[in-house]
Amino acid sequence: MDTDLLDSSLDKSTASAPFSTALAGSPAALTAATTLKKGLLWQQRDKIFSRWKERFFVLTADYLQCYKRGGGGGISEMGEFLFKVRMAEIEDVELLDKRGYLTICVSLTNREGKVYLRKTEGIREWFRLIRVRQEYFEFRVLPIFYLHV
């Protein structure tokens, strides 16, 4: 079950618009801890013998965090912390069709490989949010002389 937790300071109409100032990184609207989306996704690394595993993901303004799926009948589906990826470390985000499943491919800059994410419903929203945040960091770090050509 996915849960959108757009901060109360974010207007839902601007949050759904592509490249809105709220999601693109307006300092007044987002903090590093602002949770944009969380929920269960199937995850696979780009490594030999890697298998699809169901994981709990939290997307914040600055990070994509991965947790083991919580066990049992607890309130949260979030278990032990596994890893996090800084949005600034994401080189590219693509939406692919892999064997009939829409799959997000997250290409990492500092680490080798890719992370694949899939879900039966709501994968386009995950893709849109990750892409908007990745593009914000990609264009934010350009040297100033590129902006005045």
Image (cartoon, rainbow, N blue to C red):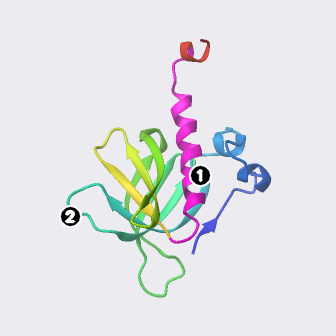
In the image as oriented, which residue stretches furthest toward the left? 48
Q: Which residue shows up at 64% across the image and 40% down it?
A: 25
Q: Is residue 15 covered in magenta? A: no
**Magenta residues: mostly which secondary structure?**
helix
Is 28 displayed left or right of 128 in the figure? right
> Picture quarter containing residue 50?
bottom left
Cβ–Cβ under 8 Å for marks 1 and 2: no
| Residue 68 location (% of width, % of height) | 38, 70
Q: Position of residue 135 (x, y in %)?
A: 55, 38
- Of helix, strand and loop, which one carries label 1? helix
| Point 48% across, 43% down: residue | 87
Say which residue appears at 68% left-offset and 46% top-offset: 18
- Residue topped by disc 2: 49
Residue depicted at x 51% and y 18%: 143
Q: Which residues are magenta?
A: 120-144
Which mark sits nearer the N-terminus, 1 or 2? Answer: 2
Residue 139 falls in image quadrant: top right
**Which quarter of the rendered picture does the N terminus lie within?**
bottom right
Residue 46 as seen in the image, left or right of residue 42: left
- Estimate the spatial distance between the alpha carbons at disc 1 and disc 2, rounded to whole Å: 29 Å
| Residue count near mark 2 (Cα–Cα under 10 Å), binned few <14, some 14–19, many ≥20 | few
Query: Where in the figure is residue 80, as x and y percent of width and height?
Result: 38, 69
Q: Is 22 situated above or below 6?
A: above
In this view, the residue in front, 14 or 58, is 14
The amino acid at mark 1 is: Leu
Q: Classify the position of the C terminus by image quarter.
A: top right
To which residue does mark 1 refer?
129
- Residue 28 image label: none
Does 129 appear in magenta?
Answer: yes
Identify the secondary structure beneath mark 2.
loop
43 shown above or below 28 = below
